[in-house]
Image (cartoon, helix red, strand yellow):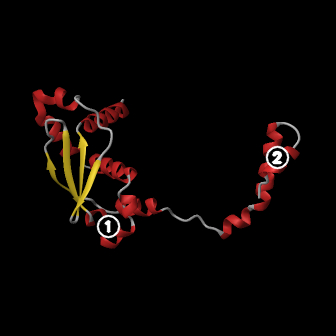
Amino acid sequence: MYNKNREKSYEGTEENHMEEFIAEIGSNFGKDNLQNHPKKISRFRELFINIANSEPIIRNIKDCDEEGDICFETLIDSMGLNYNDFLKYKDEISSDFFVNFVGEYLVRENMDKFIKIMENLKEKYYSVVNKYEHRKFGMKVVRNNFIFIFHISLIQRILTEDFKRVK
């Protein structure tokens, strides 16, 4: 293990110091140790694998309100999760990372449904879409549903990204 007091005993440049330090760590934590300790898959990865292997169904999309917020629901079990999974991953599910990642994933997978909402805005488009900027998703759980909320400007941003890729 690295001993802070030994730091003064290394001679030469800072680069040599770092090489000696790495060599010391390497001798204490070699290849054999890595093979005896296989990398454990993270809980987030387990959760996202379940979701990626499912076919989430978006339903009850509400037209955007005057502020530009859109709500939609998806069944928890359509996302490859059951009650026990929900309990197991409750901390991950309540994180901003999960909410934003899954929210945007669901929107991107269902763009055709959300573009219709933008088309229906007509003359209100500029005042509603450009009034605020989407920063993050909101989510709540009601019975067997995830209910997401986001600002419609996200749709505009995704479409702009898609157009840039087409060039």
Q: Which mark is residue 127?
A: none
Instruction: Classify the position of the C terminus by image quarter.
Output: top left
**At 26% across and 38% down in the image, what residue appears?**
155
How packed mark 1 is, by other alpha carbons closer than 10 Å (few <14, some 14-19, many 20 or more), is some
Alpha carbon distance from label 1 to label 2: 51 Å
Residue at label 1?
81
Expressed as whole percent of the image width and height from the top left, the position of residue 137 reads: 30, 46
Residue at label 2?
7
Instruction: Classify the position of the N terminus by image quarter.
Output: bottom right
Q: Is residue 51 left or right of residue 146?
A: right
State whether residue 75 is above or below residue 150: below
Q: Amino acid at mark 1?
A: Leu
**At 19% across and 44% down in the image, what residue appears?**
70
Q: Is residue 29 left or right of residue 136?
A: right
Q: Which SS class for mark 2?
A: helix
Q: Amino acid at mark 2?
A: Glu
Expressed as whole percent of the image width and height from the top left, the position of residue 149 reads: 23, 47
**Mark nearer the N terminus (1 vs 2):** 2
Question: Viewer-proximal residue, 6 or 141?
Answer: 6
